[in-house]
Amino acid sequence: MKARGLRPPSSGVGEPGSVTTASVIACIVVPGLCDHSPMEIRSPCVVSLTWKLSDAQNQPLDELTEPVEFFFGGDDLLAKVEQALTGHAAGDQLKLQLEPADAFGDYHPELVCFEDRKLFAEPVEAGMAYEGLPKGHVTPNMPADAVYVVTEVYPSHVVLDGNHPLAGMALRLHITVRDVREATAEEVEARSVGETPVTVLASAPVRPGGRTLH
């Protein structure tokens, strides 16, 4: 009686799915017939990265130890980072230097202001981010679409900075590519993998609730 769910013994010759001596030799002599090369980073795709970030004096700023996915060819990564990653594959490591013009721009002191603390819902703490200044603000000519980070809190007022926290800094980045995969249709349309919790390398502005550093 033939066991259910088990294939009958194979002679290994000429049967579909069988591995013959000839096929093994073909893989050795003609590598292209059994090519399992890792997927290269090309737009559009999704890359999984870890990194170490430091300033120009090699002082550590951030370390991402758990892999995080980013859409490649959209808004998840800085253009200079995408340029460096192009053509690489899982397991590759890169070291690059980012000047302010390639990262988060120059620091603009005119984007720093202070507003009455009463305009903010309590508790208000340093590090909190707001999209635009609160209703009733008195500082004129401030960009309405900027993200303002609270840098100092006083009994009477709050100091806000519309610059990216890394603006004006030259950065050194050591990236490890952990994985590369095809992007879904939804990711291609959105030009992003979605609510990525780490946005230090993003080309789009940091939004309230997002994290500037890991």
Image: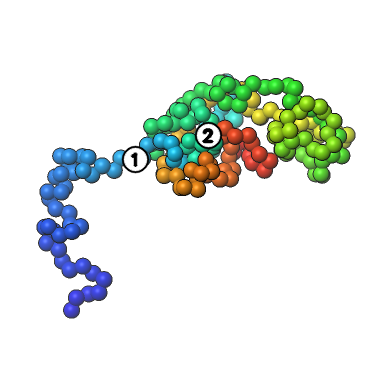
Residue 112 to residue 42: above or below: above
Q: Residue 77, which numbered label?
A: 2
**Looking at this rendering, what residue extends furthest in the bottom direction?**
1
Q: Position of residue 183 (x, y in %)?
A: 45, 44
Q: CA distance from mark 1 to mark 2?
A: 21 Å
Mark before the other along the chain sequence, 1 or 2: 1
Would you identify the image quadrant in which residue 137 lies?
top right
Residue found at x 73% / y 29%? 143
Does residue 128 appear in the picture of this structure? yes
Residue 85: percent from the left, percent from the top?
44, 31
Image position of 141 (left or right of 166): right
Residue type at numbered disc 2:
Leu
Q: Secondary structure at mark 1?
A: loop
Residue 125 falls in which quadrant of the image? top right
Q: Outermost residue, front direction?
A: 189
**Which residue in the structure is indicated by mark 1?**
38
20 sits left or right of 52 in the view: left
Category of crowding for the residue at label 1, using alpha-carbon neighbours closer than 10 angstroms: few (below 14), some (14–19), many (at least 20): few
Q: Position of residue 188 (x, y in %)?
A: 48, 43
Q: Residue at x 63, y 27 (%)?
A: 166
Q: Name the residue at 82% across, 44% down.
A: 122
Quadrant location, the C terminus? top right
